[in-house]
Structures are given as C-alpha cells and as structure tokens.
C-alpha cells in the first residue's frame, strides 16, 4: 500500500510541479540536460529579477583558479511568497548547486537543487528536496 | 480501498495537464443560482468581485482519455485525491519535498516541469480537488474541438518547444519575449500561479494579472465595441444579474504563444465571452466560451473555479524585461546547437 501511495503522490506531484514551473522559457532551449553540474561556491550576489532569479557564485578549483558562475533559479515572486528574503542567501555564504550547464558552454547553469555547504536545505533544514531520485529524501525511497 | 485504478488515470492527468491544475466540489454546482448565499454589492450597486483571485485546482484542461464518457469523479475518488493533496502540503511543510512534487530523474522524465525543485516554487495552499474531470465542459467529450489545420499547428508548436529554431529574438514565443501569454487562459494560468487582482469602479472592471503585468480595463457602461484591433482585443462588459459578462472581439493576430497550446492564440475571428459569477464568498465561477472558426470547428466552453486569496495578498511587480537573461542565453544556445550540427554533418 505504501508504495502504491508513493506512486500516487509522485503521479499527482508531476502535475503539481509542471503546473508550478510552467511559463516563460523552455529549459531545453537554454540548458543542456546532458551537462549536469555540481558546484560548491561562495555567493557573491543574488539578483532578485524577473522572470527568474540569478545567483552568482565563485567556485574555487583544485588548481586555485576561481571561476565565476551564474545560476538561474525560480521566479522571485514565488520565492518571496514562500518566505525567502534577501537575508536568506547572504553574500559570502557557501552553497552547493546542482543543475545543468548552459548549452553554449559558458559558466551559466540552472540551479535545480541548492544546499548549504553543510548539507542543510535552504528551506526548513529538510532532509532533501529529492533532486533526481537521489535517496536523500525520506519520501523518495525506491520501490 | 484500492488505488490501483486511480494511478494510471492520475499519471495521465499529470502528463496531459502540464500547466494547469485544480480542486473540490464541482464548480458547476454553483451555476444553478439556487444558492442561498447573497453576493456582496459595491457601494454603487454592482456585484462585488474585488479581491485577489487564483485558480488552485487539479482539474486537467482537457479530459484525459481515461475519463472518456465521465464528466465527474466519484466521491471516493475526490476523497482520495484530496487526501493526497493534503498529505503533499503537509510533506512540504515538513520539508519532505521530493516525492511531494513528483521529482523524477532527468533521464526518466521529459525535462519540462522538472527543471527546478520545489524549493523555487510557491506552493500556496493545498490544491483543491473538484469533481470535474476536465475544465472543458462543452463539447461533452471535454476536448478542444480543433480544426484539422489547427491540430497540425499544434503539432508544429509542440515540436518547436525548446528546440527552436532560435535564429532571432522574434523566434521565441511572446511569453519568452516577456510580452504576454494572451488573454484566453489568463485568469487561471501563470508561472507564479496566476494571481489576478480585480478592482471595480462605477462603469469599469479592471483586472491586473501578475505575470507580464497584464491588465485589462473593461468598461461596463454600455458602450459598443471599438473598431481598433489589439493583442487583447476589445473588451466590453455588462452585468447580467450577479454575473459579469465580458465580450471580447477585434483581436490582433500578431501573437505566437508557442509554449502554450494554440487554443490560447487569438486570430482576428476570435470571439471570447467570459462570465464571472461569485458563487460563494471565496469562489468565482469563471466560465469562458471560445469561438473562432480559424482554429476551432465548434465553440467550446470551460468552467474554472477561481479562489479568493487573503485580503492582504499583494500583486508584485513582474518587470520581465528587467532580467530576461533567457533571451541571450537561448539565442547563444541556438548558435551552439547550429555549430554542433555543422560539425557533426561534416
């Protein structure tokens, strides 16, 4: 029964996610689903701009080089209604971004999943947002 | 209680509904007028529709094939779906957001609707489950009665999604260009959930839609249609009892809402009739009848329950051009794709 319920959640959830994320631009027009990225970096700026927020981070590579990346997030109005403020992601804080790189190969990406460096989620300190089923989320156990 | 038969149906809803969703008690129940509830009036005597409203339901726009021949869910099905929605809301509050928003891996799912996790989204209240199996109530099969040509255009539009060509800033659709997604679906669609503020004054109803900062100033003073063609057409309103009827013609055929289904795309022959009826304190039954021989073989009607948000709900700025980095990004992505194609064809 539990797995059946989870499947029902998942099925309904797809609808919810699609509903919430619909609008504006096509992911595939801008980002490459074959270029997943995982970056640990320091926030230098968060742009509260429509139609999407952008978070700028500096990523220090093992060779000491510093790369600047721009990461696209969700719409600012939705974030704000959710309780996110400009104090939620202060400059200088270290975050981990998982997403997909821009098709043109530049240092831009979408930020599908964001965590603080210590693994805490940006909201509620939850166990996971469950980026592609990664097992981090209690509700996301595989059948 | 078995969920077995529910799952495939719901999965199909998920697949078909990308972009719309809805919740509880049939909105059509409110059309009888037999309700004992008396709608409020403005100081000057018009029905009072003022407030901030949005659609929070899970009803698919078109009826999924699984529900062919069925206009309504059973009470048990409604209760099951309602419980899932409530559990999802509780999961979100508890921070268990993965399954709650149906995250699937990129390889398992089309990327659309799966590119951002729930962290980025405004969950609002638990979505409402309604008995309707589709927002479209006429024709009786709950499907858009496209002409054959329109169906081909729909296929072309779908094929272009995320693929292009993106040769010029004119290639992305009008939403991607920060202009508008059009008026037909405005009251219940939008990336931020479709917030609409209705403000009235004697002789006018004004609707401000958050996305794209779309606004409509609708006269209700009995004037005839003007002859000017506009993207949003020429809207004139009138009161029929407790219902606001908005009749819009003279659309301009300059838009390409490629993202959305082409039912949102006006041609010069589009005739849109909208009926706003407050059926209880927190619900407007919003009913649209869409007639356009250029796209549809017959008129069609949808009924959408739109819910009132808290009095202190604010509509925020959209200022889409402010940071539409998507435009340069998708044009440069288009160039990168073209270069790759050229290389691989050598």
Image: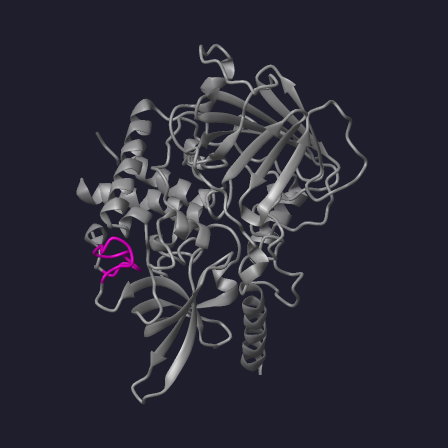
* Left or right side of A21 for A83: left
At horizontal 49% and vertical 59% (from top left) the residue drawn is: A49
Stretch in magenta? A120-134
Residue B182's spot in the image, x, y percent?
62, 44
Residue B75's spot in the image, x, y percent?
32, 23
A132 within the magenta span: yes
Relative to B38, is A141 above or below?
A: below
Residue A99's spot in the image, x, y percent?
37, 66
Dominant secondary structure (helix, strand or loop) of the stretch shown in magenta: loop
Quadrant hosting residue B90 = top left
B142 within the magenta span: no
At horizontal 38% and vertical 64% (from top left) the residue drawn is: A111
* Left or right side of A74 for B105: left
At horizontal 34% and vertical 54% (from top left) the residue drawn is: B119
- B186 and A41: which is toward the camera: A41
- B209 and B248: which is toward the camera: B209
Residue projecting furthest to the bottom: A63
* Left or right side of B263 for A137: left
* Left or right side of B321 for B85: left
- B169 and A14: which is toward the camera: B169
Residue projecting furthest to the front: B43
């Amino acid at each position: 029964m539990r797995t059946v319920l989870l499947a029902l959640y998942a099925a309904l959830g797809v609808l919810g996610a699609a509903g919430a994320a619909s609008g504006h631009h096509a992911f595939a027009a801008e980002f490459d689903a074959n270029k997943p990225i995982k970056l640990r970096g320091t926030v230098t700026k968060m742009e509260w701009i429509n139609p999407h927020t952008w978070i700028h981070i500096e990523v220090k590579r093992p060779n000491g080089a510093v790369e600047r990346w721009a990461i696209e997030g969700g719409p600012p109005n939705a974030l704000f209604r959710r309780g996110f403020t400009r104090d939620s992601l202060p400059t200088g804080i270290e975050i981990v971004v998982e997403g997909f790189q821009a098709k043109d190969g530049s240092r831009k990406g979408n930020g599908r999943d964001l965590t603080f460096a210590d693994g805490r989620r940006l909201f509620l300190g939850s166990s996971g947002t469950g980026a592609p089923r990664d097992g981090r989320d209690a509700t996301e156990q595989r059948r | 209680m078995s969920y077995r038969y529910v799952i495939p149906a719901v999965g199909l809803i998920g697949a078909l509904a990308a972009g719309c969703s809805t919740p509880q008690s049939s909105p059509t129940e409110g059309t009888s007028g037999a309700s004992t509830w008396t709608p409020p009036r403005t100081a000057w005597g018009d029905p009072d529709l003022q407030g901030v409203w949005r659609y929070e339901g899970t009803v698919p726009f078109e009826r999924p094939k699984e529900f062919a021949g069925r206009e309504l869910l059973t009470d048990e099905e409604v209760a099951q779906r309602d419980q899932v929605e409530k559990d999802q809301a509780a999961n979100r509050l508890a921070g268990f957001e993965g399954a709650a928003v149906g995250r699937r891996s990129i390889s398992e799912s089309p990327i659309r609707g799966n590119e951002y996790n729930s962290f980025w989204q405004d969950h609002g209240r638990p979505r409402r489950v309604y008995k309707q199996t589709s927002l479209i109530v006429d024709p009786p099969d709950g499907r858009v009665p496209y002409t054959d040509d329109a169906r081909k255009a729909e296929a072309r539009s779908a094929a272009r999604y995320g693929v292009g060509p993106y040769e010029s800033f004119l290639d992305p659709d009008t939403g991607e260009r920060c202009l508008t997604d059009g008026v037909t679906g405005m009251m219940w669609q939008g990336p931020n959930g479709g917030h609409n503020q209705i403000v009235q004054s004697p002789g006018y109803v004004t609707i401000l839609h958050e996305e794209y900062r779309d606004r409509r100033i609708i006269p209700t003073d009995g004037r005839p249609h003007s002859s000017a063609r506009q993207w949003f057409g020429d809207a004139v309103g009138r009161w029929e009892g407790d219902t606001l009827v908005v009749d819009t013609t003279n659309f301009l055929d300059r838009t390409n809402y490629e993202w959305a289904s082409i039912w949102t795309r006006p041609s010069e022959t589009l005739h849109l009739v909208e009926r706003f009826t407050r059926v209880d304190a927190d619900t407007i039954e919003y009913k649209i009848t869409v007639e356009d021989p250029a796209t549809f073989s017959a008129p069609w009607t949808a009924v959408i329950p739109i819910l009132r948000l808290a009095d202190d709900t604010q509509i925020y700025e959209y200022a889409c051009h402010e940071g539409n980095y998507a435009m340069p990004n998708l044009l440069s992505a288009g160039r990168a794709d073209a270069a790759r194609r050229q290389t691989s064809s050598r």
